[in-house]
Amino acid sequence: MSAILSKSNPENEVASCDLLLDYLEKIGVEFIFGIPGGAIEPLYNALAKSEKRGGIRAITARHETGAVFMADAYARNTGKLGVCCSTTGPGATNMITGVASSYENNTPLLIITPQTAQDKVGKKAMQESGDTGIDISGMFQLFTRYNSYVTHIEQFEHKLVSAIMSAFNSPGGPTHLSIPTDILKSSIPIKQQPINIENLLRRPILKDENAIQDLLTELNNSKKIIFVVGAGAKVCSSLIAQCINQLDVEFVATPDGKSFINPYHPSYRGVIGFAGHKSANRALQSNAVDTVVVIGSALGEFTSNAWDQLTLLNSKLIHIDSNQENFTRSSMAKLQVGGHIPTILEAILDNHNTLDKEKTSTPAQSVIDKAQFFSHMQIDNQKLLHFEFDEPIKTTDSSSPLKPQYLMAQLTQIFPANARYLADTGNNLAWAIHYLNPYDRRYSNRRVAKRDEHDRRSNSAGLLQICAEFCSMGWSVGSAIGTALAHPNDPVVCIVGDGSFLMSGNEITVALQEKLNVIFLIMNDQHLGMVKHGQRLNKSADIANKLPNISYALMASAMGIMSQTIETADDLLSLDIDKMCNRNGPTLLDIRIDAEEVPPIATRLKGMK
């Protein structure tokens, strides 16, 4: 028995909340994000004991949506389960946007909401939110992978295990347990043979031999191949790099796949989809290309160039994915290959090596491979881009107010290589996808036997994180907290518009309280920028997009947070970045940008027609 269980029970019983924390601790959970209240108090009592012995710790958000975004980012960046909780009623309903966002992005979360004690159900108790009040479980049913109301203490352990397992299924996502306060206060007999949760979370490696053979045949017969790297690349980025190098193919990335590629690779042609690059479109549209291999992508509006049949969704497509649901959007493909993506990529590499051996009777091929590998490394070191910006001249335009293009290009010059960037939803998302290119040599790691341990890019390696699909405004502020907790040795740069910051900027005080090294970079143009430019480009009414001229630096200063207003290139370049990135606490930069610069959002407008 763990320390949690062994201390509590002279009578061979364990408190339900202690049991809950024991399960979470066994699978490596370090934090529970939420806001306390009377109904959830038993869980916080258990957390108080846990914190004293160095176990799972409570992180107090400022709004329940922020708590979910923190848990979501923690899960994304560690591969562990994200856990968040609230009190009854409005505490639970406040979580809905965050949970829906995690559902769209398949992030493994456990959401715990309490309920009115069962002897008071139906009596109009304050914040009653069971089936006789505001039906929280009914609401969460629509966007969770598992959703259950625990009505008896005997159900507790079984439903808890079911929720944890469901969060990691394929597709994964948020799960929800609604637990009455009397059950949270109850105890449960300790089982003689405890459930082995770690064993239950092991997943078999799925390998469709027939589909893989069909894939290899298609690749062997293809004249020109191009790869499209999606978010599914997070588990196998170095394997994809090796496939690209050894097959000598060009590749592009989806907006959410960009986080897992090296943008300075000589074969990279840019982003396809929202805020993408014309060079990526041209590469896919080339008449010479007869096979387009999409790896791990939902192929929705955001990632498919607004369902573009010319570049992507056509008979050239081969779709590789571990999520069978994604195949519903690639019915036109000539081949769909489902299963464990790293295993499929290894089959491609093995097939290529076998063909090479058949072509030559000498061992010279391995030397050639190494020469090609180091040639790519040398080109990488030059940090040259091999794709095209829409407005490259503006990346060097240091005039005032600052051009967003210039700002994005400068960020990777002034911040260290290990900085992790989050780009909120809005104009700043488009600017970051198109112009922000963090440099990361880890993409070129060699093959290793234990990928999850040694591939440093695995689940935790995204250097540019976005909220794809659901695109919630304000998500980055809370997500920066979760990211910083997951990567305490790396500075986190939260790129957020003034509109999004006004929605959720209060979470910055969590970074202050937890002494987290997060730089909140506010792109201040006194507008809801994407709304404004979308209205102009669509020739719609210019309405409801203006924001007041607020000094966010003064606001942060009032909170006790280090801050500075940036109005010129000199202001930006004179920042003491080393001091900022080694501070035990957050920094806010109020950056005044040129509000008239039009972001690269043509794909979004196409999708709205």
Image (spheres, rainbow, N blue to C red):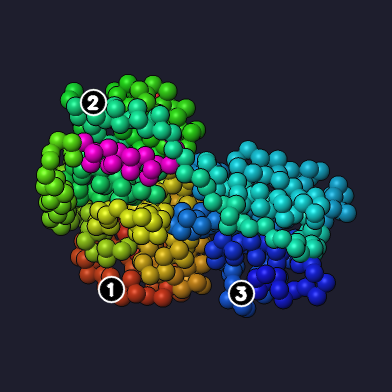
Q: Amino acid at mark 1?
A: Asp
CA distance separating discs 2 and 1: 52 Å
**x, y (%) of residue 132?**
81, 43
Which secondary structure dominates the residues rendered in magenta? Answer: helix
Left of 323 or right of it: where is 4? right
Q: Is residue 344 magenta?
A: yes
Q: Position of residue 329 (x, y in %)?
A: 44, 27
Q: Is residue 570 visible?
A: yes
- What residue is rendered at 11% in x and 44% in y? 362
- Disc 3 marks which residue? 51
Q: How many marks?
A: 3
Location of the N terminus by quadrant is bottom right
Q: Secondary structure at mark 1?
A: helix
Q: Amino acid at mark 3?
A: Glu
**Image quadrant assignment for residue 537:** top left
Mark 1, Cα crowd under 10 Å, few <14 / some 14-19 / many 20+, is few
Which residue is rendered at x = 33% and y = 72% of the image? 580
The picture places residue 381, in percent across and down from the top left corner, at: 15, 57
Q: Is residue 303 left or right of residue 72?
A: left
Give the residue number, with chain letter if any, for mark 1.
578
